[in-house]
Image (tube, rainbow, N blue to C red):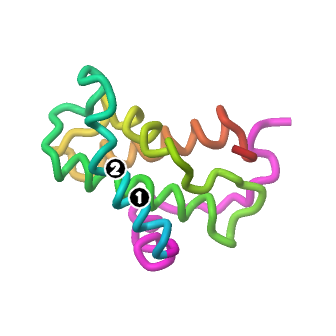
Amino acid sequence: ARPNDGLVQRRISYAELLAEARDEVPKATAEQIEADAPRTFSALPKDLWPRPVDGEGAQAALMRILLAAEWRHANAARSDIGATYTQGMNFLAALCMADLWQPSDGLAGEELAFWLLDFVLVCVLGTRF
């Protein structure tokens, strides 16, 4: 069986996920993401930071990626996905941003980083992560 057999497939764009996530992710989870984001990049080796790290822009992108991932994997429209926000997921997302995110790209690089994180969570770590 393929890693994502059993997933309820719903075509949705990253922008749509973000819009839904802002309203629907539980407040406690959003607050944890907001607390984790500022300390994420400084805990990684500098050669793994997204370039350039402009402080707030990279942190804001990281928070958006994590909120969208939380909503995609935890909302009731999906089944058999256990990858809700957990300790350390911020580091996985930051590593996905490393060479993909550029502040000048708008949401393009951020969206690529999000879908890479989604792939890692679903196809590499598995739906019971």
- Asked which quadrant contains residue 42, the reply is top left
Q: CA distance from mark 2 to mark 1?
A: 9 Å
Residue 44 among those drawn in magenta = no
Q: Identify the residue shown where x is 47% and y is 37%.
A: 92
User: Looking at the rendering, in which quadrant would you find the C terminus?
Assistant: top right
What amino acid type is highlighted by mark number 2?
Leu
Q: Position of residue 110 (x, y in %)?
A: 33, 47
Does residue 121 lie above or below 35 as drawn? above
Which label was assigned to residue 62? Answer: 2
**Which residue is label 1 attached to?**
33
Q: Residue at x 32, y 33 (%)?
A: 43
Q: Which residues are magenta?
A: 1-26
74 or 19, nearer to the observer: 74
Mark 2 crowdedness (10 Å alpha carbons): few <14, some 14-19, many ≥20: many
Location of residue 119 (image quadrant): top right
Q: Per the image, is 12 magenta?
A: yes
**92 with respect to 77 (left or right):** left
Residue at image point 65% right, 32% down: 124
Q: Quadrant of residue 80?
A: bottom right
Which one is earlier in the sequence, the residue at label 2 or at label 1?
1
At x 65% / y 42%, what residue is drawn?
Answer: 122
Q: Is residue 28 above or below residue 100?
A: below
- SS for callout 1: helix
Report the amino acid beneath label 1: Ile
- Image check: 47 left or right of 84? left
Given residues 94 and 45, the one toward you in this image is 45
